[in-house]
Amino acid sequence: MTRLPHAFAALALCAAALTAHAQSPQPPEVAAKAYLVMDVSSGQILAGKDMDAPVEPASLTKLMSAYVVFDALRAKKITLTQTLPVSERAWKTPGSRMYIDPKMQVPVEDLIKGMIVQSGNDATVALAEGVGGTVERFVEMMNDQAKALGLKNTHYTNVDGLPDPAHVSTARDLALLSARLMQEFPEDAKYYAIKKYRYPGTPASNDTNRNTLLFRDPTVDGLKTGHTKAAGYCLVATAARDFPNLKGRRLVSVLLGATSDSTRINESQKLLNWGYTAYDDVKLFDAGQPVATPRVWKGKASELKLGSATPIVVSVPAGTAGQVKTEIARPDPLIAPFKKGQTVATLKIKQGDQTLGEVPLVALDGVEESGFFGRAWDAMRLWIQ
């Protein structure tokens, strides 16, 4: 998977406005209790139903379990080659399994594959104990991370998604979590594209990823299935497709509460295909490209380049890209000094009278304050103006 832009964080605030736009394409009928399709490249929600309704997420829980494990790897608290013991608790955890047992010492990378590809509850518990010390402490880490990511309607009581009425999330939260997971851990996200895996000495019949979209659609490279009686059949799917104006345009679909495995697969495919055809992505500016170069006063440089550290992308109904307009809101005059990366202005993205989003513009280079005489000269010029 390719690294994803942070642009979605800036544009996500406008999602409700976009989906309510008079020109917005009508989404398909979807056989699920709740669903959502998000364009990760822009951060906009293209369509959804009951996006904030709390539901039991089943094994979609393991998206957060994986996030916490990947974070521990990034912090070098564990390594991929490190082996972890399999406790009695992990071994006896019910539900889907990797089929490891207490006689084994299993490398972290294999446990990750077991958690993701086989949806192994035993592997997830073993990782939780290895990272958190105890399952209970790991659950606390999951809830802390949910708060840090702004998942407002998510609460975890376990690491694997076994049924519990107090263990809940929403389509919106799952989409946000999925986007952040892929963005922050692009090297680790590769595990979600693995079609077949089993640990040596475990049943060959348990080697196939339950996300059968991986076998059907070559642009799909994740993410996670889930199923319990309470949750129904669930799937978070993601695909990346190349377009002439944007390579690797990524969508995420979240489908909750379908009635069968085939339904969750077919409906998820429907959502992804609809999102790609109903909406176009418009890349307005590349990462680091100056959006504006306004005059600066009392500085060692006379101009300040404003832009974004990531590409600025917006999703619009297909065929309406020519209607997108931008305007910049900033203080005037701009008085030095400015530090590189300092937020200076806001780019407003509009289509007709509808605001699609607002993106902060930062100083692409720093501008130091000029000396006494330079400041005095500019002060006089400003006064004359």
Image (cartoon, helix red, strand yellow):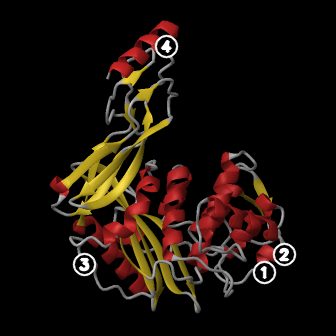
- Asked whether the beta carbons under mark 1 and mark 4 sit within 8 Å of each other, the answer is no
Between tags 1 and 4, which lies in front? 4
Q: Which of these two is toward me, 44 or 111? A: 44
Q: Is residue 95 above or below residue 368?
A: below
Marks 4, 3: nearer the viewer: 4
Distance between mark 1 and mark 3 Cα atoms: 47 Å
Q: Which of the two labelled residues, at mark 4 and mark 3, occupies the earlier sequence position?
A: 3
In the picture, the disc for residue 92 is 1
Tell which circle, 1 or 4, labels the residue nearer the N-terminal end: 1
Q: CA distance from mark 2 to mark 1?
A: 6 Å
Which element type, helix, strand or loop, lies under badge 3?
loop
Q: As rendered, which of 71 and 36 lies closer to the eye?
A: 36
Q: Is residue 368 above or below residue 4?
A: above
x and y percentages locating residue 225 in the rendered image: 52, 76
For disc 4, the marked residue is: 370
Mark 2 vs 1: CB contact within 8 A: yes
Of tags 1 and 3, which is closer to the observer? 3
- Percent from the top left, x then y, of residue 99? 69, 75
Of all residues, the one furthest to the top in this rendering is: 373
Residue at 47% of width from left, 61% of height from top? 193
Badge 1, how many Cα within 10 Å: few under 14, some, many 20+?
some
Q: Amino acid at mark 3?
A: Gln
